[in-house]
Image (spheres, helix red, strand yellow):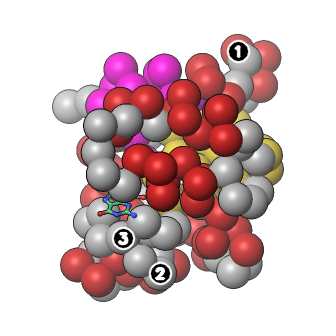
Amino acid sequence: MSGKRTFTMIKPTAYKNNCTGQIIQKIYEGGFHIAAMKITKLSKKDAEKFYEIHAERPFYGELVDFMSSGPIVAAILEKENAVEDYRKLIGATNPAEAEKGTVRAMCGTSIGENAVHGSDSDDNAKIEGDFFFSERELH
Ligand code: GDP
């Protein structure tokens, strides 16, 4: 069982398409507590740093450009087994392959513009949450 916190971002296209409300609704229906949330925008440098682990992948440049192209919603979510349960809630990386009813199936438009980010481990959830929020912004 993974820990209590995960980190998510609503990506630029989903934010622009007014999917934020639906996604927050799914988060609550999934039994998560929203411990922190804000609308912000990544600079190209921020996005490069956030996605550093993907630097060698062929889509890195595209990913960085996309993630810094417009506002995003960043949030820390809490629940037992948060990392794993949130990845189930969002579905497969490619929205075309994501199970019906998942966030990516609902709001994703392509493999790159797949509506949301979800941490893939407890360690990354902590690193990613700390990238956006200070302790006093957690409730
Ligand atoms: P995730 O953990 O499901 O988000 O997937 P990954 O860790 O494999 O990839 C990180 C992010 O990179 C994904 O959420 C996508 O936004 C993006 N990505 C992954 N594969 C591709 C691809 O083939 N093309 C593009 N343009 N972006 C991709």
Q: Is residue 101 above or below residue 120?
A: below
First in sequence: mark 2 vs mark 1: 2
Helix, strand, or loop for circle 3?
Answer: loop
Q: Which residue is mark 1?
A: 135
Ligand 1 is within 8 Å of the C-beta of the residue at disc 3: yes
Q: Which residue is mark 3?
A: 111
Q: Nearer the viewer, residue 106 or 12?
A: 12
Q: Is 50 positioned to the left or the right of 42 in the image? A: left
Image coordinates for residue 42, horizontal then vertical, percent: 71, 43
Q: Find out whether the residues at labels 2 and 1 contact each other: C-beta distance under 8 Å.
A: no
Helix, strand, or loop for circle 1?
Answer: helix
Q: Which residue is mark 2?
A: 109
Question: How dense is the environment of label 2, judged by Cα within 10 Å: few (below 14), some, or many (20 and up)?
Answer: some
Q: Is residue 117 within the magenta segment?
A: no
> What residue sits 47% from the left and 21% below the top?
126
Is residue 51 visible to the viewer in this orientation of the structure? yes
In which quarter of the view is residue 47 placed?
A: top right
